[in-house]
Image (tube, grey):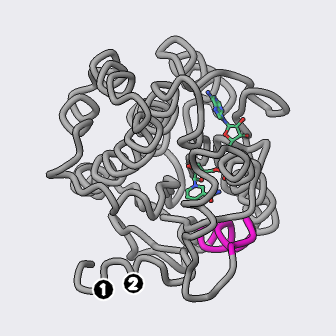
């Protein structure tokens, strides 16, 4: 039975992923701020280190799977929390848990990014250098200095850098025998999306962000793709970003893929 750690397990896409993985036979260790096997805070370096330490202790240093769902929406205040959780809260767990995954059976990891990852390309991402170099204070300063645009910048910039971080790890993780992919959801009915809809700064943009399939996703529609990527059926899928977005990336960027 694979042993898999899931962050953001208490809500939305993470909670649906826990259910899908359990149905596929995984034993899941959930991580979240509350209502989880490991409670901890991914927004601080100390919180992330404590979560990695507890994960290693609980798993006896051996994990078969890792799914990183924890994240915050662009409406979060202060906006610097978004870069801390969405980028550092994912990348530091990837790097901290790779040795445990290497010891696992047919190990795999999935990181939840976003369609927003492609909306602010790496070459134009003002956060790219600060995030890639691990300078959390600099990333916070850039976001906080962006005023009204800070939330959008923090969300799109951190998701762009997160997908790049995964792709840049494809070589090392492949050699380590651990598959690593991202899922890029479009608008999905979760508390995160509801919080954005209730914020006048983001509400109209979210409502106008209509996919060709003309509806929003149910979190289970993300979880089923995550479960596929974590399964043997995806044994040659590595370093890929799967858009699960009702077609919105295709209509936004038809010539780029
Ligand atoms: P959600 O709000 O339902 O779940 C996110 C979970 O992350 C919550 O349980 C929350 O407690 C946890 N979390 C937040 N900050 C944390 C921290 N500091 N430490 C530990 N856990 C923390 O949101 P949802 O929608 O399920 O989001 C999951 C992922 O999907 C996020 O990374 C989000 O950016 C991404 N996503 C969501 C979309 C949507 O429309 N809902 C669209 C594209 C991407």
User: Main SS of the magenta segment?
Assistant: helix
Question: Which is more toward the observer, 109 or 145?
Answer: 145
Q: Which residues are magenta?
A: 216-227
Residue hosting label 1:
254
Q: Residue at x 69, y 56 (%)?
A: 13
Tell me the tag on residue 121: none
Identify the image quadrant of residue 180.
Answer: bottom left
Total numbered labels: 2
The image position of residue 122, as x and y in percent, is 21, 52
On screen, residue 100 above or below 156: above
Viewer-nearest residue: 234 or 194: 194
Is 186 placed left or right of 170 in the picture? right
**x and y, in percent, of residue 20 in the image:** 76, 65
Q: Nearer the viewer, residue 217 or 234?
A: 217
Residue at image point 60% right, 59% down: 204
The reply to whether the magenta stretch includes residue 224 is: yes
Neighbour tally class for label 1: few under 14, some 14-19, many 20 plus, Cα within 10 Å: few
Quarter of the image that includes the C terminus: bottom left
Residue sitting at x 45%, y 74%: 235
The residue to which callout 2 is attached is 250
Residue at the top extreme, as displayed: 46
User: Front-most of 187 and 84?
Assistant: 187
């Amino acid at each position: 039975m694979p042993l898999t750690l899931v962050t953001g397990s208490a809500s939305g896409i993470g909670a649906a992923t826990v259910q899908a993985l359990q149905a596929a036979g995984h034993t899941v260790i959930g991580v979240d701020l509350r209502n989880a096997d490991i409670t901890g805070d991914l927004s601080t370096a100390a919180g992330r280190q404590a979560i990695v330490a507890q994960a290693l202790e609980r798993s006896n240093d051996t994990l078969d799977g890792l799914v990183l769902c924890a994240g915050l929406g662009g409406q979060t205040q202060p906006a610097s929390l978004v870069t801390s959780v969405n980028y550092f809260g994912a990348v530091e767990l990837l790097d901290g848990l790779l040795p445990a995954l290497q010891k696992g059976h047919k190990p795999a990891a999935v990181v939840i990014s976003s369609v927003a990852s492609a909306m602010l390309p790496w070459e134009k991402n003002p956060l790219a250098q600060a995030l890639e170099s691990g300078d959390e204070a600099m990333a916070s300063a850039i976001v906080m200095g962006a005023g009204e645009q800070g939330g959008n910048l923090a969300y799109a910039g951190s998701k762009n850098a997160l997908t790049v971080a995964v792709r840049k790890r494809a070589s090392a993780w492949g050699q380590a025998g651990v598959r690593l992919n991202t899922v890029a959801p479009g608008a999905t009915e979760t508390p995160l999306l509801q919080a954005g809809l209730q914020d006048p700064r983001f509400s109209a943009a979210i409502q106008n962000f209509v996919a060709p399939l003309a509806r929003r996703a149910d979190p289970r529609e993300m979880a089923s793709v995550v479960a596929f990527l974590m399964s043997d059926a995806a044994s040659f899928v590595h370093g890929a970003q799967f858009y699960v977005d009702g077609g919105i990336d295709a209509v936004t960027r038809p010539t780029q893929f």
